[in-house]
Image: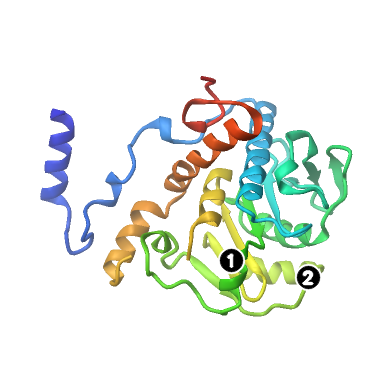
Amino acid sequence: MATITATIQHVSVTGSKSDHPSGDPSLAFPDDDQTLPPVFTDKFAERKHLKHRLALAFRIFGKHGFGEGVAGHVTLRDPVDPHAFWVNPFGLDFSLITDDDLILVNSEGKVIDGGRNRLLNYAAFAIHSEIHEARPDVHCAAHSHSLWGRAFCATGRELQMLSQDACVFYKDHALYRTFAGVVLDSDEGKHIAQALGNKKALILANHGLLTAGNTIEEVVAWDGLPACGDSTAEAQSTWEALGHSKAGYFMGLPQFQRAERDEFGERTYLGKGIEAL
């Protein structure tokens, strides 16, 4: 308690209220390794772990109704071969996907590993291959046709900072205004990657949503947030507290805790998929 009190007192003395009206953003999450993604030395063990996390992500998307028929895809950069990525097979409902269903696609768009269904949604390759190529920091990217996401995309505008959740995207999302139909050309994928730039989210006008990040968990968290305050300072402060990769990872964990339990009958510490409870 004395340590916590001392920390708070230090922040109140050194922190600038003008810069951060609601307090120091660094206090939003514990500075503890337990809140960070696990680190692997064995890349094949990491692949196994991440494939299961990706399957959980699809179950979460399925439960929230983020799928629309055969549309939508989430990709994971392969830790063994970083030039390839795992993605859902074309035609399989999000809510049914398992680790073994996922397919591995190389940089030429060839399926080189996977389950019984090895059909590739070419739109997934056209978009995600260009994002993974342009952004080495992006290990996961998701594109969904959610009901509310599509409704907002039809407005053709960026998010307004009207809620705490929206502030997560403060100056960290973009709008792609040119919709040319189903993305079946790598040049269109390049244009989408360019529009995303170094941001975490892209609103595809009249189409859907796209989120990208270092971890599967943060991408799930970003994609599920609805579209903070009324001032730039408040929005900036909230983004600093909640808008970074570590925060996204931690905010995404509760959804994985529920998915572990409901979809696979599992339970791990904090839902990180490492320490079984």
Give the Cα distance between marks 1 and 2.
17 Å
Residue at image x 53%, y 59%?
200
Instruction: Tell me the residue at 66%/59% (across/down).
Output: 143
The location of residue 242, given as percent across then percent down, is 38, 52
Q: Is residue 86 visible?
A: yes
Closer-to-camera residue (128/71): 71
Residue 155, position as x, y percentages in the image: 56, 79
Q: Is residue 57 above or below residue 206?
A: above
Q: Tell me if label 1 and label 2 are in contact, CB under 8 Å.
A: no
* Crowd tier of the residue under label 2, counting other residues whose Cα lies within 10 Å: few below 14, some 14–19, many 20 or above: few
Q: Looking at the image, is 133 positioned above or below residue 264?
A: below
Count of marks placed on residues: 2
Q: Quadrant of residue 223?
A: bottom right
Judging by the rendered image, the residue that carries numbered circle 2 is: 182
Q: Amino acid at mark 1?
A: Gly
Disc assigned to residue 149: 1
Question: Which residue appears at 11% of the width and 42% of the height?
Answer: 9
Q: Report x, y in % for residue 10.
A: 13, 43
